[in-house]
Amino acid sequence: MVKRAKQTPAQYDIQYDFYTILPEAEFVIPDHEVKTRKREERVGKAKSGVQYSVQAGAFRKHKDADSLKAKLLMMGFSPKIEKAIIGSATWYRVKMGPYNQLASVDAIQSRLKSNKMDALVIEVKK
């Protein structure tokens, strides 16, 4: 008969799926790839099951995010602020979307650039 040692809580294998699930759910699309994917949409080769958001900024202070949100509202957009906790830091992300078509995202990005604002395009799985 084999005698097994009693496991203490420190000996249990802990598996955190968060680190594998989150990167699969959302990622940034580089600018050059937006144009390529937009072309693929026109010819019917677009990815299915994904949507896109536009992140106009990320701030440590909510009031800074709120200020950008106000500017975007004045430009006719419908932004929202999402709170994200990364490590011990809290970030307030100003986002627009989700959008089903990259053509919409590209138009928003162009309009932001003409107002000297940068933005990230983020692909989100449905």
Image (tube, helix red, strand yellow):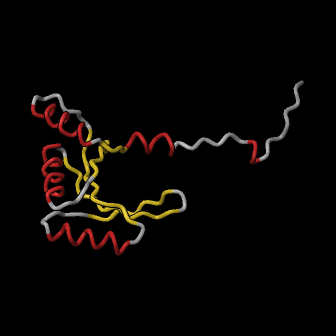
For the point 18% across and 38% down, the residue is 35
Q: Quadrant of residue 93?
A: bottom left
For the point 68% across and 39% down, the residue is 13
Q: Position of residue 92 (x, y in %)?
A: 38, 64
**Quadrant in the picture for the N terminus:** top right
Which of the pair 111/47 is nearer the observer?
111
The residue at the far top in this view is 1
**Quadrant in the picture for the C terminus:** top left
Q: Quadrant of residue 5?
A: top right
Q: Position of residue 90 (x, y in %)?
A: 46, 64
For the point 10% across and 33% down, the residue is 42
Q: Position of residue 91 (x, y in %)?
A: 42, 63
**Vertical comparison of 79 with 109: above or below:** below
Q: Position of residue 6 (x, y in %)?
A: 83, 40
In-image side of 74 versus 14 (left or right): left
In-image side of 30 versus 105 (left or right): right
Q: Quadrant of residue 32?
A: top left
**Vertical comparison of 98 with 126: above or below:** below
For the point 42% across and 67% down, the residue is 60
